[in-house]
Image (tube, rainbow, N blue to C red):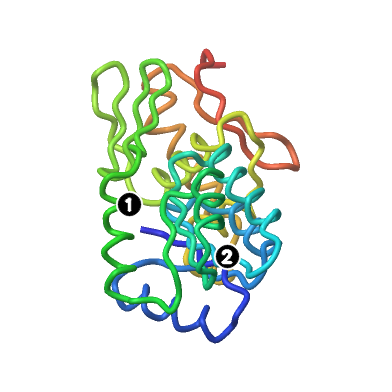
Amino acid sequence: MRVLVIENDSEQSEALTKLLEENGYQCDKAESLQDGRYFLDIRNYDLVILSWPEKSAQSHLSIIGDIKKNSHKTSVIVLSERRDKESEIEALKSGADDFIRKPLDEEILLVRMEAKLRFGASNIIEIEDLVINPEEEKIIYQGKEIELKGKPFEVLTHLAIHKDQIVSKEQLLDAIWEEPELVTPNVIEVAINQIRQKMDKPLGITTIETVRRRGYRFCFPKGAE
């Protein structure tokens, strides 16, 4: 499970990230809303932990709205030092899934995270006869399971989530590889080729098209060329 922590207090951000990683979560941290938006653009998250400001929260309301609009399967938990009821109502009305006041009880936070991830919306992608199940690493087309695992499966899933958007090699590397700086962009070409050889050609379909000099786009349903 991948979590994004948006917390402008570097000490709290570090402590929270350490807690989550110790409990088995993959974690990215952003110390500003701008950095948070950058991560949200390049990666898929199961959950976002968002620190609530003491004063105006308009920008925070906006980012919650954008998350729910563009990644509606991503849960959002707000952490706040504010004690007033109005801020909690405001956050929840904007689309936040939970509101937890600071100072944090770590055990409570972890339990609430587990609840949101356990009962959250399904991550299954269904497009006509094609079903992609990221949790079970399974692809089914017209009732038949397709053998595609590992990085090719993750590449296909990421592109399917961002259907009709052009995704660059660099964005795919950042989203899927834990240490993208240690691999070359050629690994993306290898993964795309495996998708086409193991899935597209045998099934007579086209799932991914190359957009010259820009990247790749998930284009199913589309007849084979």
Looking at the rendered structure, the secondary structure element under dot 2 is loop
Image location of residue 159, percent across then percent down: 53, 38
Instruction: Tell me the kind of residue under disc 2.
Output: Trp
Residue of label 2: 52
39 to the left or right of 137: right
Residue of label 1: 116
Of the 4 image quadrants, the one containing the N terminus is bottom left
Q: Residue at x 41, y 59 (%)?
A: 2
Frontmost residue, 45 versus 210: 45
In the rendered image, the vertical position of residue 58 relative to residue 223, given as above or below: below
Furthest toward the bottom, the residue is 11
Image location of residue 80, percent across then percent down: 51, 68
Report the Cα–Cα distance between label 2 and label 1: 19 Å
Instruction: Tell me the kind of residue under disc 1.
Output: Lys
Which label sits in the foreground, 2 or 1?
2
Image location of residue 185, percent across then percent down: 60, 56
Say which quarter of the image contains residue 29: bottom right
Frontmost residue, 81 versus 66: 81
Say which quarter of the image contains residue 65: top right
Numbered circle sitting on residue 171: none
Frontmost residue, 13 versus 217: 13
Looking at the rendered structure, the secondary structure element under dot 1 is helix
Image location of residue 147, percent across then percent down: 28, 36
